[in-house]
Amino acid sequence: MYCIRDCSLSDFADIIEIDREAFNSTNPTFDLFVYVTYGSDIIVADIGRKVIGYLVLMDSGKDAKIMSFAVKKEFRNRGIGSMLMDEAIKRCRERGKGRLLLEVRVSNISAQEFYKKRGFKIIDTIPSYYSDGEDAYLMCLDLWREQF
Ligand SMILES: CC(C)(COP(=O)(O)OP(=O)(O)OC[C@H]1O[C@@H](n2cnc3c(N)ncnc32)[C@H](O)[C@@H]1OP(=O)(O)O)[C@@H](O)C(=O)NCCC(=O)NCCS
């Protein structure tokens, strides 16, 4: 029913819409520009050609990082985020990456729970990481220790 695949140009409008909805972004087009410029993979979930979720991976030497990750509101809690995360972890392992890192708002408890259930741990706090001044937790998954 859902297809997990690499992003194509025709998915950009859907990704911008999801980004705007999920992060209240004032400039989702610029966000996409950053993903395309610095990301190594933009993995999408589609349902009959419409993209309903995405995860952006960035290469970071021995490690990899999740730059952005969101599922359209009406499609959450159906396993789509898990499928995107599984694909990202699989790609990182295939490339011999040591860790998968991400930043998450300290107020975003539901995302933190999602990550913790999948083996991520908080390893640091980054003060005023976001443009509105909120701190971020740096979370880390050891790709060779955790079992899924
Ligand atoms: C974080 C986020 C991407 C997760 O996406 P999602 O598609 O809702 O994730 P899933 O559906 O795989 O998992 C969420 C819950 O749905 C339920 N679920 C999972 N698979 C399911 C299935 N097949 N059927 C029904 N429910 C399911 C589970 O209860 C799961 O909770 P768990 O963590 O206890 O396993 C999504 O909540 C989101 O877009 N949030 C806003 C943006 C955001 O905060 N991004 C992260 C920034 S760091």
Image (cartoon, rainbow, N blue to C red):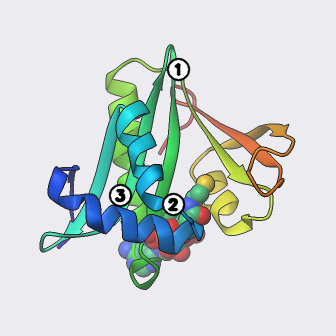
Nearest to the observer: residue 95 or residue 102:
102
Residue at (50, 14) in percent of width and height: 61
Nearer the observer, disc 2 or disc 1?
A: 2
- Please tell me whether mark 3 sits on a helix, a strand or a loop: helix
Nearest to the observer: residue 95 or residue 6:
6
Q: CA distance from mark 1 to mark 3?
A: 20 Å
Q: Are the residues flagged by discs 1 and 3 in contact, CB closer than 8 Å?
A: no
Q: Quadrant of residue 36?
A: top left
Measured from the top left, where is residue 119 in percent x and y?
61, 45
Q: Earlier in the sequence, mark 2 or mark 3?
A: 2
Q: Amino acid at mark 3?
A: Met
Q: Amino acid at mark 1?
A: Gly
- Residue underneath mark 3: 83
The number of numbered discs placed on residues in the rendered structure image is 3
Measured from the top left, where is residue 21 in percent x and y?
50, 75
Q: Earlier in the sequence, mark 2 or mark 1?
A: 2
**Residue found farthest to the top:** 62
Q: CA distance from mark 2 to mark 1?
A: 33 Å
- Residue underneath mark 1: 98
